[in-house]
């Protein structure tokens, strides 16, 4: 019996890339990779965001079910701002993500269905949010078997594994290497609008956690809300000194006021920082 041909994704420099950003919570793909997502979408590439939990722990007063519904609506609005084609949210509880075999299968299936050329996710071994580490671990393990036809046989295997990049958890920046730094000044406004679409997080829960809730501008002041996010979430948006230092040490062209930083993963398709820089611009 002749085995079926595996389905492969286009090459690294294909005319149209397939990009998958995998995070633990709705809003994190936007925070950490929204700038490059918007750049790639504008250039005609396919971009999908995948959240492995529904974010139902991210509020001090809204019950879990209602919050999960709200966060899904926010995520879809954010996707429109960035030009992201899909924003999928798995129905797993926030704060309870574990790298189980069942979830690994789900991640394998989604990498294959999207036929991802490039996967961006979190580090799997570093301080920071426990769900973020679990997300990184799930992606690492899934990528290792995306080419095996007998693993999740309901979805055709990929011929070539995706290139994989790691985005920093800003609670663990010391553990992140700035291999690829992308100037996102041209798409920062789209990224800001996407972040503001996640109002439950940027304008409610996170300010509440930081004791800033009384400083949040009202909905009638969108300019003030934009400035509030820029001021208090600068590490997610603005080019940090350590990023500028890494760019200078590598002898690269300086980046602008806004940048996103990524580390080459030690799994997935082999590539170089120079190749990825050329790809992401």
Image: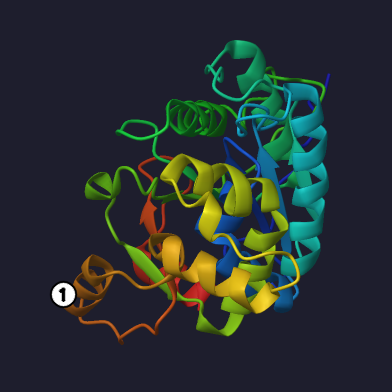
List x then y, in percent, for residue 126: 30, 34
List x then y, in percent, for residue 114: 75, 46
Single out the residue that lies furthest toward the front: 214
Determine whether the residue tagged by mark 1 lies in a helix, strand or loop: helix
Check the image and tell me how it is coloured: rainbow
Q: Residues within 10 Å of mark 1 (few under 14, many from 20)?
A: few
List x then y, in percent, for residue 225: 61, 69
Q: Quadrant of the N terminus?
A: top right
Is any part of residue 184 visible from this angle? Answer: yes
In the displayed structure, 62 sits above or below 117; it is above
In this rendering, would 50 be left or right of 252?
right
In this rendering, would 270 be left or right of 200?
left
List x then y, in percent, for residue 211: 44, 46
Q: Residue at horizontal 36%, vertical 82%?
A: 255
The residue indicated by pointer 1 is 249
In this rendering, would 65 be left or right of 99?
right
């Amino acid at each position: 019996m002749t085995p079926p041909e595996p389905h492969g994704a286009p090459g690294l420099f294909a005319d149209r890339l397939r990009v998958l950003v995998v995070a633990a919570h709705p809003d994190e793909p936007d925070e950490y990779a929204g700038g490059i997502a918007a750049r790639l979408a504008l250039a005609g590439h396919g971009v999908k965001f995948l959240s492995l939990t529904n974010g139902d722990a991210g509020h001090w007063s809204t019950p879990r079910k209602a919050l999960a519904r709200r966060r899904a609506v926010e995520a879809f609005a954010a996707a429109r701002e960035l030009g992201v084609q899909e924003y999928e949210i798995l129905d797993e509880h926030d704060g309870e993500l574990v790298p189980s075999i069942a979830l690994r299968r789900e991640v394998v299936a989604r990498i294959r269905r999207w036929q991802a050329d490039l996967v961006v996710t979190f580090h799997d071994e570093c301080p920071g949010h426990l769900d973020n580490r679990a997300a990184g671990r799930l992606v690492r393990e899934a990528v290792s078997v995306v080419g095996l036809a007998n693993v999740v046989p309901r979805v055709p295997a990929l011929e070539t594994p995706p290139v994989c990049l790691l985005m920093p958890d800003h609670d663990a920046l010391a553990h992140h290497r700035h291999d690829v730094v992308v100037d996102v000044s041209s798409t920062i406004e789209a990224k800001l609008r996407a972040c503001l679409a996640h109002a439950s997080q940027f304008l409610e829960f996170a300010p509440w956690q930081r004791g800033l809730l009384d400083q949040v501008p009202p909905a009638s002041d969108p300019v003030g809300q934009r400035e509030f996010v820029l001021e208090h979430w600068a590490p997610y948006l603005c080019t940090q000194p350590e990023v500028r230092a890494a760019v200078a040490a590598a002898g690269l062209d300086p980046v602008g006021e806004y940048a996103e930083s990524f580390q080459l993963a030690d799994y997935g398709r082999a590539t170089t920082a120079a190749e990825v820089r050329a790809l992401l611009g």
